[in-house]
Image (spheres, coloured by chain):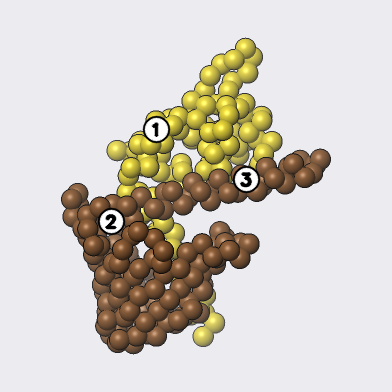
Amino acid sequence: MNLRRDVFQAIADPTRRAILVLVATQSMTAGAIAANFDSARPTVSKHLQILTECELLQQEQNGREIYYHFNAKKMKEVADFIEPFRQMWDERFNKLETVMKKYKSKK
Amino acid sequence: MEQKTKINAEDGKQDLTITREFDLPLELLFTAYAEPELVEQWMSNQYSTTKMLKLESKKHGAYQLQTTDPNGNVVFRANGVIHDFVPNQKITRTFEMENTPFGVQLEVYEFEKLNDETSKLSMHVIYESVEQRDQVLKLPFAQGINMAHNRIEEILSKMQNSDRPVFI
C-alpha cells in the first residue's frame, strides 16, 4: 500500500510527468533526459531514482550506458485508480486556502 | 501523514463524497464559493484559467464557467443550476460539462465550523450511473498526462525552430 502511494506521489510532480512522456517515446540515458530540463542534473537524477523505485521506469545496461525505459504496465495500474482524482481536488483546495488567506489579510 | 482531502467512492455505487478540512474560518471558506472573482482565482492554475461567465449565488440561481489554456483556447465549459443556497451552511447545485458524455451530476456542499479558525467542507456528488461516476474518476489522470504531453510537444516544436538548447 505504501509503495502504491509512492507511485502517485511520483506522478503528482509535473517534471516527473514530463520525464515519463519523454521516455515513453524512446528509451534514453540520464544525460539525454537531463538535457531537456532546466533543473540541475542531481535534481533530474533524483526524479529518475524515484520513478525507477516505483517501477514507472526501468533501467537497462547497454554497453557503458544505462538506458531508462518506460514501464507501460505499471502506468496502466496507476491509471485505473482513484488517487489522481483525489490529488486534483487536494491541489484545488490548497489553492483555495492560499487565495482566501491572502484575501483575508487584504481586508 | 494524514491526507487533508479524502475521497470515499465505494465500488459499484453512483455517488462519492469528498471531504476537506480548511485552515480558514467558516465564513471565508463559504465566501470562496460565493464570489465569482474568488472562484476564478482558486480554480485557475499554471495550465489553465477559469472564468465565471455567470454565477448567481442564490436559491434558483445558475452558473456557467469556462476554462482556457495558456494560449486562450477554450478547453472546458460547464454549467448548472443552484437549487439551494444557504450562506455558511449549504449549496445544492447541478454540474454538467458541456459537450461531453459525462451527463449531469447533483452536488451537495455542506459547510461546517470546526472552531474559530478552521472549517470543513463535505461534498456529496451523485452521478447518473455507476459507469458515469467511474469515468469521471479517471478524468484527472488523463488530463495530467495530456498536459505533460502538450508541454513536451511545445518544447519539441521550439527545439525544431532554434539551434540553441531549450529548457523547460
Per the model, the C-alpha gap separating discs 2 and 3 is 31 Å
Closer to the camera, B144 or B63?
Answer: B63
Q: Residue furthest right?
A: B163
Residue pointed to by mark 3: B153
Closer to the camera, A38 or B144?
Answer: B144
Q: Is residue A31 visible?
A: yes
Q: Residue furthest left?
A: B12
Residue pointed to by mark 2: B132
Residue pointed to by mark 1: A74
Pointer 2 chain = B
Residue B21 horizontal side relative to residue B71, left or right = left
Chain shown in brown: B
Pointer 1 chain = A
Closer to the camera, B53 or B37?
Answer: B53
* Mark sitting earlier along the chain (2/3): 2
Please state the horizontal and vertical placement of residue A91, each as a whole percent of the image: 44, 59
Q: Residue furthest top?
A: A63
Nearer mark to the viewer, of 2 and 1? 2
Do dots 2 and 1 share one subunit? no
Please state the horizontal and vertical placement of residue A18, each as a whole percent of the image: 56, 43
Q: Amino acid at mark 3?
A: Glu
Q: From what the image shows, is residue B60 above or below residue A51? A: below
Please state the horizontal and vertical placement of residue B168, each as a whole percent of the image: 66, 47
Q: From what the image shows, is residue B106 above or below residue A26? A: below
Q: Amino acid at mark 1?
A: Lys
